[in-house]
Amino acid sequence: MKICCIGAGYVGGPTMAMIAHKCAGHTVTVVDINQARIDAWNSAELPIFEPGLDEIVQASRGKNLFFSTDVDTAIREAEMIFLSVNTPTKTYGVGAGRAADLRYVEKCARKIAEVAEDGKIVVEKSTLPVRTAESVKRILESNSNGRHFQILSNPEFLAEGTAIEDLTAPDRVLIGGDQTPEGLAAIQKLVDVYAEWVPREKILTTNIWSSELSKLTANAFLAQRISSINAISALCEATGANVDEVAHAIGTDSRIGPKFLKSSVGFGGSCFQKDILNLVYLCEHFGLPDVAAYWYGVIEMNDYQKHRFGRRVLSSMFNTVSDKKIAVLGFAFKKDTNDTRESAAIYVCRDLLEEQANIAIYDPKVSAAQIYKDLEIDADHPNVTLCGDAYEATKDAHAVLILTEWDEFKTLDFKKIHDSMQLPAFLFDGRNILDLDALRKIGFEASGIGRG
């Protein structure tokens, strides 16, 4: 079978690379109108960093995996078309700040209707609000001219930094479609693709609406757990409890479990906030304001946590950071990715810049251009310096902030760092990855999230 994926981003690229890698009999073409992005996928330096991704792409590229800007040809030749385009939160009109912006999805549907010469199986891979498939189907059917289209929902459940592991051995693969003979046949076609390497009992099939809603709900539940433990972290700091000990104690309860109970400066990434806001908008749209308010509280708690961290830095440093050098270690929203979308570091840095601090930033994977873009500053901003390593960033600093849990930060020579800093030397561990007692013995005034 010939498979096409429209969208060469964080989801489309790795997912299609894995399908090509595991399904040698299928030809997979990833298309995008962004020439620079396609050129990067065809180069030695891929546009995204994911452990293990480079090896997967190298093994299949040019054999049964192709990256191209020829969207029309890929659509015409494919039997199955994945839609993996961006669905950002709307910044305009009705639903601004909450609803998903579906213009790119609709443009894809219209492009398929325009150039397809026969019927296609169209697979929603982007995270979409409930009943988006209905819109896609209406566009295609209104322009069918005798062609028959089947729409499937196949949401991704990838975690950045572990995407290749998640694709290799997923907890589940979810496929939703019409419960008609034609819809069930289309579902089976996609089941057969994943069944090449995923155990059949882990491939779940549902109606299309359940599949679309399951993706939003999964991310909402995960984000809710993080906001819940972060709320408790504030109480721990006020009472002298240790949030890591509390999390371990409740995580041993089999009804709760240990995952996503790691307190931090706040969650980020491309999905959690966007999907919860989308869920909030849907609840409001369907006349459920109380349900909407419940889920919006998850976002509010996350925002509170990010700004609370900045306020704690300020209050600990004698209520002023003006003209003080603050070393920021980590800018990505989590380790093992160069993605900065909704990273807590952005918000903390902005708060510090408002207080006229001098910020020295080091991240092993995030580019300088991306940091400047996220902070909405020029490269010559007098208060921001980008550094080549952690030791350069921390030299002569008044404080060190750990904002991404990169493994290399755990093994830094903190005695060397302390000796190069201004005194008193403050360290704020926003990811709870360091031994605070050991740091205090060195001489740091060290604090973490939810612990003394």
Image (cartoon, rainbow, N blue to C red):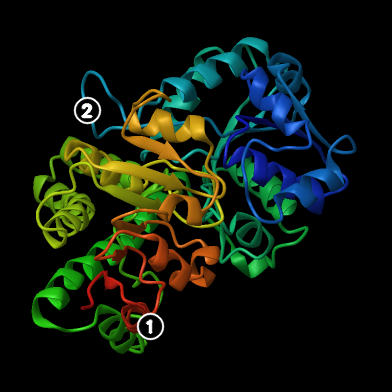
Is disc 2 surrounded by few (<14), some (14 to 19) or many (20+) residues within 10 Å? some
Left or right: where 18 falls relative to 379: right
The residue that label 2 is drawn on is 95
The answer to whether 244 is drawn above or below residue 171 in the figure is: below
Q: At x 34% / y 54%, what residue is drawn?
A: 397
Q: At x 49% / y 56%, what residue is drawn?
A: 391
Q: Quadrant of residue 262?
A: bottom left
Q: Quadrant of residue 431?
A: bottom left
The disc label shown at residue 109, or none: none
Q: Secondary structure at mark 1?
A: helix
The residue that label 1 is drawn on is 438
Quarter of the image where the C terminus is located: bottom left
Q: At x 49% / y 51%, what residue is drawn?
A: 392
Label whose residue precedes the other's in the sequence (1 or 2): 2
The answer to whether 286 is drawn above or below residue 118 in the figure is: below
Quarter of the image where the N terminus is located: top right
Is residue 274 something that shows in the picture? yes
Q: Secondary structure at mark 2?
A: loop
The answer to whether 300 is drawn above or below residue 251 in the figure is: above
Is disc 1 surrounded by few (<14), some (14 to 19) or many (20+) residues within 10 Å? few
Q: Amino acid at mark 2?
A: Gly
